[in-house]
Image (cartoon, helix red, strand yellow):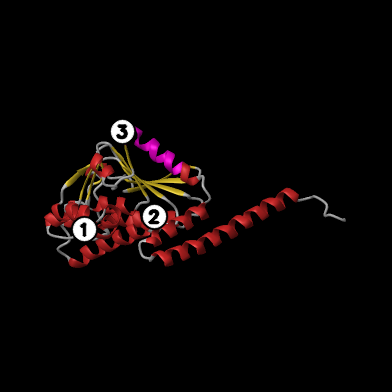
């Protein structure tokens, strides 16, 4: 019996790990895998018990090397190609807009679609042997699942032009230097580092994290004055939440005590 292409595992009290599970194909993604990933990530997004997510690939060679060749061979059918791209695009947009942090544990080769999946995540932690590339232009099409937009906002126009137009491969050390990843670690340490970061995040107030993420994400689309006003609005919501929590705590501490004058 074949195992699912996407594995979902609870790896901590409020942490889940989502694994692209096609190691024999270097975790290349076909339509079925993309559909499974969208369904799993939709479920995770709606699960209030999950406060942090880890996304990784199965095996020791690759995170995700792109779309599977068996899938792209079918893309002479424009409807099939559009359906595949739309499922991936919707999934990456869902991840990028999720109200809980997503840690991408990049365990090896990461190309094309794999880079675009990683870009949608909140944090990117890579093993020292990771390699990154967007070779789509060299194959005659665009990296159109978010790369031109998310990569440019992340590492700047000049470096994005270089990566996308040349299709060059970027090694882990350079990826760290240009800001493509947050940190690099030896391969054996990657699962523990990703889990530790997710655990640290999961211990924080989920509403406060959500509001902070919303403010940061909105910054790129707002002018300074508008952004500061939005930040102040979210701070008020955070304050109301904190006041309510303190009231609940106080009420619990005072439960059963006689009222003054009683």
Q: Is residue 191 magenta?
A: yes
State the image coordinates of residue 200 (x, y, percent, origin top left).
Answer: 47, 42
Asked if residue 205 lies left or right of residue 36, the reply is right
Q: Residue at x 51, y 44 (%)?
A: 203
Contact? badges 2 and 1 (CB < 8 Å): no
Q: Is residue 63 visible?
A: no
Please state the horizontal and vertical placement of residue 49, each as a whole percent of the image. Answer: 51, 51
How far apart are the alpha carbons under marks 3 and 2?
A: 28 Å
Magenta stretch?
A: 185-199
How far across and down, in percent of the image, does residue 226 sit?
43, 67
Residue 120 seen in the figure? yes
* Lower position in the chain sequence, tag 2 or tag 1: 2
Q: Which residue is mark 2?
A: 41
Q: Which residue ends up furthest to the front in the rendered image?
A: 225
Q: Are marks 3 and 2 in contact (CB under 8 Å)?
A: no
Dominant secondary structure of the magenta stretch? Answer: helix
For label 3, the crowd category at 10 Å Cα-Cα, with few meaning under 14, some 14 to 19 and many 20 or more, is: few
Per the image, label 3 sits on a secondary structure element best described as loop
Quarter of the rendering containing residue 31: bottom left
Q: What residue is shown with label 3?
A: 186
């Amino acid at each position: 019996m074949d195992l699912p292409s996407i594995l979902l595992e609870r790896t901590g009290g409020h942490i889940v790990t989502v694994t692209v599970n096609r190691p024999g194909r270097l975790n290349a993604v076909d339509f079925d895998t993309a559909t499974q990933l969208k369904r799993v990530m939709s479920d995770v997004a709606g699960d209030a018990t999950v406060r942090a997510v880890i996304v990784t690939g199965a095996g020791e060679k690759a995170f995700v090397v792109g779309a599977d060749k068996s899938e792209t061979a079918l893309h002479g059918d424009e409807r099939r190609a559009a359906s595949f791209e739309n499922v991936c695009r919707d999934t990456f947009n869902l991840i990028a807009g999720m109200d809980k942090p997503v840690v991408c544990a990049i365990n090896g080769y990461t190309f094309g679609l794999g880079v675009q999946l990683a870009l949608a995540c909140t944090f990117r932690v890579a093993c020292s042997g990771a390699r990154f590339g967007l070779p789509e232009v060299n194959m005659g099409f665009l990296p159109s699942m978010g790369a031109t937009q998310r990569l440019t906002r992340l590492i700047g126009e000049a470096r994005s032009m270089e990566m996308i137009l040349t299709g060059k491969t970027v090694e882990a050390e350079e990826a760290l230097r240009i800001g493509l990843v947050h940190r690099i670690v030896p391969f054996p340490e990657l699962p523990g580092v990703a889990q530790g970061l997710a655990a640290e995040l999961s211990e924080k107030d989920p509403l406060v994290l959500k509001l902070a993420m919303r403010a940061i994400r909105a910054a790129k689309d707002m002018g300074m004055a508008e952004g500061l006003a939005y930040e102040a609005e979210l701070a008020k919501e955070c304050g109301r939440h904190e006041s309510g929590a303190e009231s609940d705590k106080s009420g619990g501490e005072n439960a059963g005590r006689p009222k003054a004058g009683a």
